[in-house]
Image (tube, rainbow, N blue to C red):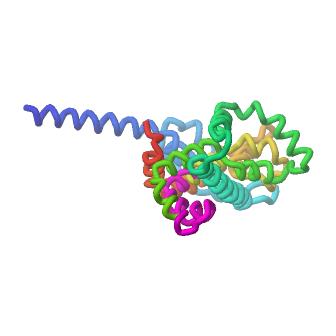
Amino acid sequence: MLNGSRSIKTVVYHVFVCALAIAAMYPILWLIASSLKPNDEIYSTASSLIPSTFTWSNYAKGWQGFAGTTFGTFMKNSFIIVIISTIGAVASSAAVGYGFARVKFFGSKFWFGAVMLTMLLPQDVTIISQYVMFSKLGWLSTFKPIIVPQFFGIPFFIFLIMQFIRTIPGELDEAAKMDGCSKYTIFYKIIIPLIVPALVTSAIFSFYWRWDDFYTPLLYLNDPKLYPMSLALKLFLDNDALNNWGGMFAMSTLSLLPIFIVFVAFQKYIVEGISTSGLKG
């Protein structure tokens, strides 16, 4: 009787989980299905996930891009922004996190609190002053306003890495000091190899945030040849002509591939990095 009750609970649990998974995946499935439909059938058969006629022309037309700029250029711009920004965000956050975790200096608690408080500030509060500053520097319509700020540390990554470093025994530092290592040597040769899960977790989050960022490129980039994929997708919608919904959905599906590959390749580091740093619920 007890085994029968457990079996029913197990079946109900799996049905409930499967229903949630389907509900979560439905927008992506709808996007992929729409990318394979003719442009005039996308919304007339929106309730169906199975196209009446499979067509791959949306991918070919979407890849052609606009005004001689192919979608490969937009993808290249995205990779340039994402890769350099991620390197800067992770490297600077690791250095700052190590400083707060291991180096004693005057006012460290105050400065750490100040860094954490910046997470509470909405982006809209600082966007005008940042725009004026970058305008005076002559950085508008370049990648610099998007990339350079990432080299000054990201508060969430600083906190994540600092928490991870605090789980490493301080005796390792003391032993290294007795062997003549400086703080910089300890950081590069001892701490960095031990915090790889936190670094990879930060890199994955940074990759996602920069890849999906629409607002910042929209604000600073004026030349369509510099647009990343997130901004280029908007060009498929033209108020004065017929919208190319099929091309937009096809390129949107293509833009998901790097995120999917990164998540599948490094998902174990996300779990390890978050659980070890004490951020889990």
Instruction: Tell which residue pokes out farthest to the left in this image.
Output: 1
Query: Does residue 244 appear anywhere in the picture?
Result: yes
Question: Which residue is rendered at x = 55% and y = 66% of the image?
Answer: 189
Instruction: Tell which residue pokes out farthest to the front in this image.
Output: 178
Question: Which residue is rendered at x = 73% and y = 40% of the image?
Answer: 215
Most frequent secondary structure within the magenta stretch: helix
What's the magenta region?
177-202
Left or right: residue 105 versus residue 227 is left
Question: Which residue is rendered at x = 76% and y = 30% of the image?
Answer: 125
In which quadrant of the rendered image does the C terminus lie?
A: top left
Q: Give x and y (percent) for residue 259.
A: 56, 53
Left or right: residue 53 versus residue 67 is left
Left or right: residue 16 versus residue 244 is left
Q: Give x and y (percent) for residue 16.
A: 32, 34
Question: Which residue is rendered at x = 57% and y = 36% of the image?
Answer: 44
How many numbered marks does the figure carry? 0
Name the image quarter holding residue 177. Answer: bottom right
Give whichever of 29, 205 is nearer the camera.
Answer: 205
Query: Does residue 63 appear anywhere in the picture?
Result: no
Q: Give x and y (percent) for residue 17.
A: 34, 37
Q: Is residue 147 magenta?
A: no
Left or right: residue 125 versus residue 261 is right
In which quadrant of the rendered image does the N terminus lie?
A: top left
Q: Give x and y (percent) for residue 237.
A: 73, 41
Give whichever of 70, 155 is nearer the camera.
Answer: 155
